[in-house]
Amino acid sequence: MVFRTGILLMLALWLSACASVESFRKMTPAQRAREVCTGIDAYTQLDSDEREHARKAAEIRQVLDRGYRLHESCRTIEASKAPEIVCPSSASRSGDTRCSKEQNGKYKRICRDIPVPIDGALEKEKLAEHDAQARARATEKNQLYQRCYTQVLPMSAEQAYDYYKQH
């Protein structure tokens, strides 16, 4: 816990050291504009949304390729009554995998992956929607970046830093 707190404190100090008027003075106008524009809340939110839609689209592609979804059904039983089964990583699961996980040494959680049929047409609709949303967020993000970049590029280091702090 102390180690984790120390790491977080060092990261916060490093980040604050990166964003100072002095560091902005050392940057070229293009570097300052890039630093400011990729750090504003609206840009980071659009970037996050774009990545989330892309992740969901990739997941749906995987489901379509496999032909079914996996639903994990779990139950908790006393450890003394649990069979000795090792859990594979979620990346290596394929179908009816069973596993158990220790919980406080007294109980084990036994899980089973259950294949669930999919509606291919519905999955393709959801895929198209997530792809469209990811493209829309990417377009919005790029437009926001371009507007910001053209606004920040001619600014002095001090003006760019003030803009950075306000956004």
Image (spheres, helix red, strand yellow):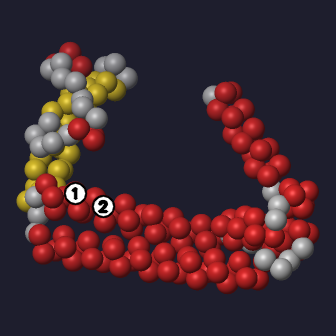
User: Residue 145: where, in percent of width, then height?
Assistant: 63, 77
Note whether 127 is above or below 83 in the view shown: below
User: Residue 6: where, in percent of width, then height?
Assistant: 72, 32
Question: Mark 1 and mark 2: span between their CA atoms?
Answer: 6 Å
Amino acid type, residue under disc 1 in the picture:
Gln
Please give the residue where the numbered disc 1 appears in the rendered image. Answer: 62
Left-right relation of 102 to 96: right
Q: Residue furthest top?
A: 80
Position of the C terminus, as image quadrant, is bottom right
Position of the N terminus, as image quadrant, is top right
Residue appearing at x 91%, y 69% in the figure: 158
Which SS class for mark 1? helix
Answer yes or no: do the residues labelled 1 and 2 have beta carbons within 8 Å? yes
Q: Is residue 164 visible?
A: no
Residue appearing at x 70%, y 79% in the figure: 148
Q: Nearer the viewer, residue 146 or 73?
A: 146
Left-right relation of 117 to 133: left
**Mark 2 surroundings within 10 Å by alpha-carbon count, few (fewer than 14), some (14 through 19), many (20 or more):** some
Q: Is residue 145 visible?
A: yes
Disc number placed over residue 58 in the picture, else none: 2
Please state the total of marks drawn on the protein image: 2
Q: Quadrant of residue 31?
A: bottom right
**Mark 1 surroundings within 10 Å by alpha-carbon count, few (fewer than 14), some (14 through 19), many (20 or more):** few
Q: Nearer the viewer, residue 87 or 131?
A: 131
Which SS class for mark 2? helix
User: Residue 78: where, in percent of width, then height?
Assistant: 22, 22
Amino acid type, residue under disc 2 in the picture:
Ala
Left-right relation of 109 to 68: right
